[in-house]
Amino acid sequence: MTLPLILLPGMMCDARLFAPQIAALSVDRDILVPGISGHDTMSALAEQVLTDAPDRFALGGLSMGGIVVMEVLRQAPERIAGLALMDTNPLAEAPEVKARRGPQIEAIQRGELASVMRDEMKPNYLTDGPGRQAILDLCMQMALDLGPDAFVRQSLALRDRPDQTATLRGFRDPALILCGRDDLLCPVERHELMHDLIPGSTLQIIDGAGHLPTLERAEQTTDALRRWLKEIDDG
């Protein structure tokens, strides 16, 4: 019997971020994509994931979702059969990023969610490619659907998050570390660090993708996840 897979989306994203993977992998496996916008701390977000999760599961996340994944691992390592960390960052928030949070939150509270997403966030998401505009449009729609309160809570959780390098260092089950080669937000060196922290992990760098390889290079990302899940199932 295959274990369920929980996927956690990035900031201001929902299950649509993983639509190609869900379509391909749900043929023989339950896939759950819980929201991660209901609390303003990583600890509370992870607790909510664990409250709603099966007893044991495979766990993957992209960007902020990956950061929540690491907090879930810190809280309940015995429940996680394998980790997929995609386009994410194990470190506490850098001071220069933290300094931007306050002005962004103030803009959001003035009703400027669409402009913040358009001008400050989305330009950093993707590399150039034929599907770029369609993916940007989807990102905007996901953000607008989640709304300004979610943006504020997620921003606070990201701002105050802990360093998780020690958490990763103890993991021994199958682990996939994946990122787009052109990711500007969570660059390749962050993933090389995570790969070094987790013995036996697989590092997969996706060419022709930026921060959202699940959509930019869906087939390659799905193939990597499928290999990782097979390793979990065979174990």
Image (cartoon, rainbow, N blue to C red):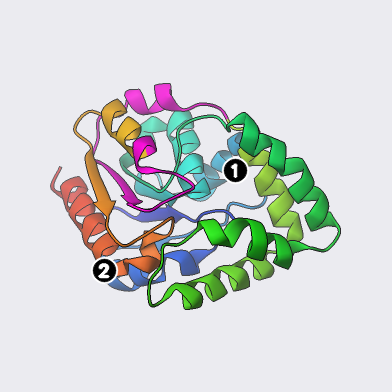
Amino acid found under the numbered disc labelled 2: Glu
Residue 207 vs 21, above or below: the answer is above
Q: Which residue is mark 1?
A: 45
Question: Would residue 40 be visible to someone looking at this image?
Answer: no
Residue 173 is one of the magenta-drawn residues? yes
77 left or right of 147? left
Give the quarter of the figure containing the C terminus.
top left
* In the foreground, 117 or 145: 117
Q: What residue do we see at 70% from left, 55% from top?
A: 150
Residue furthest to the front in view is 128
Question: Would residue 5 be visible to someone looking at this image?
Answer: yes
* In the foreground, 111 or 148: 111
Range of residues picked out in magenta: 162-190
Numbered circles on residues, count: 2
Q: Position of residue 69 (x, y in %)?
A: 45, 42
Q: Which residue is mark 2?
A: 219
Residue 213 vs 231, above or below: the answer is below
